[in-house]
Image (tube, rainbow, N blue to C red):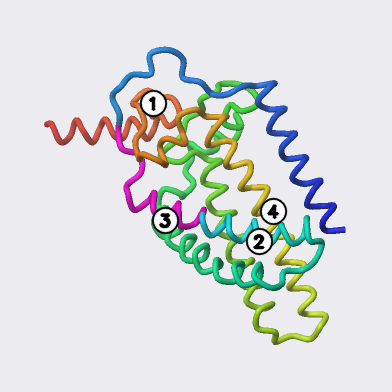
Amino acid sequence: MFRTIVLVGVAATVVAIVGHLVLFGAKRLGKGQGKRTVRRFSLWERFIHLLTVAGFLALVLTGFYAVVFLKSALHGWLWVIHVASAPALVIGLLLVLVTWAKDGRFTPCDWEWALKFGGYLWGDKHAPAERFNAGQKAYFWIVGLFGFVALVTGLGRAVPMLDPCGQEFLYQVHRYCALAFLLAGITHLYLGTFANPGTLGAMLTGKVTTRWAETHHPLWWKSLKEDDESKDA
């Protein structure tokens, strides 16, 4: 049953992504993107993001490979790799939460972004946003919650302290949480690549063009300019 839910969930997410791209298209900047760039992410921020992604991929590939292709619970080397990769995700998530907690705080402007759904379905394609928009902030906290639940239930499975009924409950919560994590990750990947050209480069190089910053995160861009002006004064 869970295998079917996984396949349907992934397929539905991919279909929704393709449908959105066909119907609404990407948030392109148009001509004249400019060559001037500004720093969006530091080397440290890119490192902890990479660490989190690496741990996430290792856990997803081992866990869901067993479910979808082996049609069984984790065992053997897959289980070893799965368990050994968990610290990377946990440490990465903790560092990400601590590093970006301030930028992840919701503010009044996020309501406007939410009402416009970020321009992904209707209205202005570029709603007001700070360094992170409302959608990114929501994803940030949801992933933190999923990570915490997956950690607790995973530890409960690895170190059995409950009766068989309790252990089965932990197992079900763990894998459904992992599935939600996977679907959220797929959507996040789409939004950071095809839906918003230039966004992936920000995480790879740490820099974005001034046009990208002004278009996607106008309030953040405004604060950068104000900081530069105050330094020059």
Which residue is denoted by mark 2 in the rendering? 62
Residue that lies at the very extreme toward the top in this rendered image = 31
Q: CA distance from mark 4 to mark 3?
A: 22 Å
Q: Secondary structure at mark 1?
A: helix
Q: Secondary structure at mark 4?
A: helix
Crowding near the residue tagged with mark 2, few <14, some 14–19, many ≥20 C-alpha atoms within 10 Å: many
Check residue 96 for magenta coloring. Answer: no
What residue lies at 49% left-to-right and 60% top-to-bottom? 93
- The answer to the question of whether label 1 and label 4 lie on touching residues, with beta carbons closer than 8 A, is no
Q: Residue 152: which quarter of the image?
A: bottom right
Check residue 40 for magenta coloring. Answer: yes
Which residue is denoted by mark 4 in the rendering? 180
Q: CA distance from mark 4 to mark 2?
A: 16 Å
Give how far across and how far down residue 151 sits, in percent. 60, 69
Which residue is denoted by mark 3 in the rendering? 48
Q: Secondary structure at mark 2?
A: helix
Which residue is denoted by mark 1 in the rendering? 214
Give how far across and how far down residue 122 sits, in percent. 64, 23
Crowding near the residue tagged with mark 1, few <14, some 14–19, many ≥20 C-alpha atoms within 10 Å: some
